[in-house]
Amino acid sequence: MPEQPVEIKVSSPAASEVETAAVVAALRRFLDDNAPSAAVAEPRQPAWLVAALSEGVQRQPQLPPLWAAGGA
């Protein structure tokens, strides 16, 4: 989810520029510290690999010893 910009305005005739800047900085830091953390996407395996693993498929099937040796 993209971050939405936050606009902070302080309108008080009694506050000086330094005080206004301090309040805005404190609010910005509060928002940054309390923002929800970004969700980390898990690495996905290809669909064919998931299907093969769920079915127990091997790349080369294990042959009985007689077939592997070329015997009859």
Image (spheres, rainbow, N blue to C red):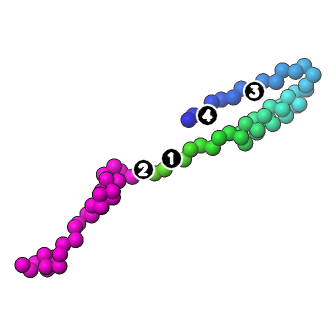
Of the residues tagged 4 and 1, which is closer to the observer?
1
> Picture quarter containing residue 59?
bottom left
How busy is the neighbourhood of tag 4: few (under 14 within 10 Å), some, or many (20 plus)? few
Q: Secondary structure at mark 2?
A: loop
Quadrant where the C terminus is found in the figure = bottom left
Circle 1 residue: 41
Q: Which residue is mark 2?
A: 44
Of labels 2 and 4, the one closer to you: 2
Q: CA distance from mark 1 to mark 3?
A: 31 Å
Q: Is residue 34 above or below residue 48?
A: above
Q: Specify the segment rendered in magenta.
A: 45-72
Contact between labelled residues 2 and 1, with CB atoms less than 8 Å apart = yes
The label on residue 3 is: 4
Residue 44 against residue 71 in the figure, above or below: above
- Residue 25 point in image, percent of width and height: 80, 35
Of the two numbered discs 3 and 4 on the same chain, state the one appearing first in sequence: 4
Q: Is residue 26 above or below residue 20?
A: below
Q: Is residue 57 located in the magenta-colored stretch of the structure?
A: yes
The kind of residue on which mark 3 rests is Ile
Q: Is residue 72 left or right of residue 54?
A: left
